[in-house]
């Protein structure tokens, strides 16, 4: 989330000597030094803003309107955070993502509950001593270094009580002083670099999104995608029932009604034909219902994941090799919800490989992973180039995006490797969620 791209100030590169001598003139060094100055120049305004926010929050704690004003100031801390992130990005080459947007909350007290705003103000206070110490030390190195290097030219202008001992005013002594000053100047870029390191770490820690907030946002996005996927699936089932099975059953009802009328009129030959048509339509409707039911929950899963995948492989349009580890096949190892996700994910990957990748074979391996997890690896020998987001710059997602969201909705991990020319390897890690095994391990009624 935080990337370091600023220039290296000294001593690093293919020509160490040249880098060392040129480090004091490096743009990266002077940008870092300017960053320390700007942070310190902003310090009085930042400290005043923080004190105003804290004092106003404390003074208006018994009111309602005042709390809204204090909450507005807390939210304003986000703007200060954006300023400091901009300085770090432009001068240090450190890019820190902005915190997640503030959640709308009702109530006067909840206006103050903006963690990102408070964290920004904590940075505003904590950065002052760090910037002051770094600036003082680095400036001391720079001034003393430049002063020592040029001491030979201006030492005669100093009063006797301020000048160095006369023993240093010999050519050899002045050369030693100049050499010491040169060493300080050459060390100055490293001092500046070290001075901005704590501020860089503080910027990433306080001005960016927290890992927990990113995790929550990721879970919310995955769950929203799962809900949309489930809604789309229900709509597809409804459409299939309405346009297919329902229409077919309506036709069967009409045919049976017509057959009853013809039977009353004494035309058994036509009745037999109508009954034959109705019988065939009924069998077609049953076939469609079975396909719909299989799309909701494959009956083969009732016999275990291994059996269901073998059945899926036998129906696939290309050879599919399936290996399920013995630990995964153990009864109660996987919760039913996880088994369904594994089955439908593999079914979708098999369909994609046959339809888009022009693969000739697919290999599926399911094994127990570290901890209470199961790892699924699906590999095809197709032409590769599969992506979750389409690479044409449109931002549109491929069919794998829904699969990735389905995996992440249960705290799983989805990884795609598909270089041009293949092979395509999809690796998924899912929690086993051994609910059935845990329930079986608990003492039964009447036992201990």
Image: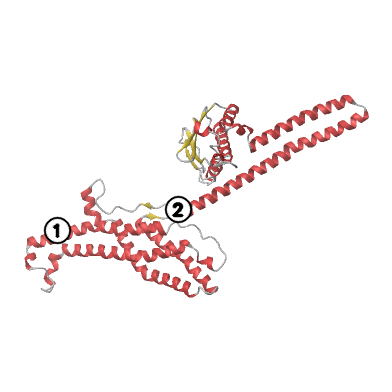
In the image, is residue 210 above or below residue 440?
A: below
C-alpha span from label 2 to label 1: 49 Å
**Quadrant position of residue 158:** bottom left
- The quadrant of the rendering that contains the C terminus is top right
In the image, is residue 39 above or below residue 362?
A: below
Q: Is residue 99 visible?
A: yes
Query: Pointers 2 and 1 in contact (CB under 8 A)?
Result: no
How is this picture coloured? secondary structure
Q: Secondary structure at mark 1?
A: helix
Which residue sits at x=36%, y=64%? Answer: 126
Callout 2: 10 Å neighbours few (<14), some, many (20+)?
Answer: few
Q: Nearer the viewer, mark 2 or mark 1?
A: 2
Residue 268 image position (x, y, % from top left): 89, 25
Residue 291 image position (x, y, % from top left): 67, 34
59 and 154: which is toward the camera: 59
Q: Which residue is mark 2?
A: 211
Which residue sits at x=86%, y=27%? Answer: 271
Q: Which residue is mark 1?
A: 179
Relative side of 188 to 327, left or right: left
In the image, is residue 92 above or below residue 420?
A: below
Relative side of 89 to 157, left or right: right
């Amino acid at each position: 989330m935080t990337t370091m791209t600023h220039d290296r100030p000294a001593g690093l590169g293919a020509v160490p000597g040249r880098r060392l001598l040129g480090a004091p003139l490096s743009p990266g060094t002077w940008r870092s030094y300017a960053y320390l100055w700007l942070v310190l120049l902003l310090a009085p305004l930042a400290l005043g803003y923080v004190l105003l926010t804290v004092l106003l929050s404390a003074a208006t704690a018994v009111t309602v309107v005042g709390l809204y004003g204090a909450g507005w100031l807390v939210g304003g801390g986000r703007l200060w955070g954006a300023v400091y992130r901009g300085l770090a990005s432009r001068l240090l080459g450190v890019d820190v993502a902005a915190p997640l947007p503030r959640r709308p909350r009702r109530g006067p007290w909840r206006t103050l509950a903006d963690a990102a705003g408070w964290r920004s103000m904590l940075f505003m206070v904590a950065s002052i001593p760090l910037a002051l110490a770094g600036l003082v030390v680095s400036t001391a190195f720079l001034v003393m270094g430049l002063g020592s290097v040029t001491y030979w030219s201006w030492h005669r202008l100093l009063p006797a009580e301020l000048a160095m001992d006369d023993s240093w005013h010999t050519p050899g002594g002045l050369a030693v002083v100049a050499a010491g000053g040169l060493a300080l100047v050459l060390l100055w870029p490293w001092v500046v670099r070290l001075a901005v390191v704590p501020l860089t770490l503080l910027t990433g820690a306080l001005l960016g999104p927290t890992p927990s907030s990113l995790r929550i946002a990721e879970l919310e996005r995955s769950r929203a995608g799962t809900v949309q996927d489930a809604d789309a699936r229900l709509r597809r089932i409804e459409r299939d029932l309405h346009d297919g099975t329902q229409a077919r059953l309506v036709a069967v009802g009409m045919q049976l009604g017509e057959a009853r009328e013809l039977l009353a009129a004494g035309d058994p030959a036509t009745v037999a034909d109508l009954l034959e048509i109705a019988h065939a339509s009924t069998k077609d409707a049953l076939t469609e219902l079975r396909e719909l039911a299989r799309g909701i929950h494959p009956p083969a899963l009732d016999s275990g994941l291994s059996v269901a995948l073998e059945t899926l492989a036998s129906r696939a349009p290309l050879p599919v090799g399936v290996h399920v580890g013995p630990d995964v096949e153990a009864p109660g190892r996987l919760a039913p919800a996880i088994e369904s996700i594994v089955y439908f994910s593999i079914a979708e990957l098999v369909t994609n490989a046959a339809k888009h990748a022009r693969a000739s074979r697919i290999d599926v391996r399911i094994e127990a992973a570290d901890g209470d997890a199961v790892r699924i690896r699906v590999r095809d020998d197709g032409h590769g180039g599969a992506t979750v987001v389409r690479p044409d710059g449109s931002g549109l997602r491929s069919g794998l995006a829904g699969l990735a969201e389905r995996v992440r909705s249960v705290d799983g991990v989805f990884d795609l490797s598909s270089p041009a020319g293949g092979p395509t390897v999809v690796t998924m890690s899912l929690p086993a969620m051994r609910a059935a095994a845990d329930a079986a391990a608990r003492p039964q009624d009447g036992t201990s």
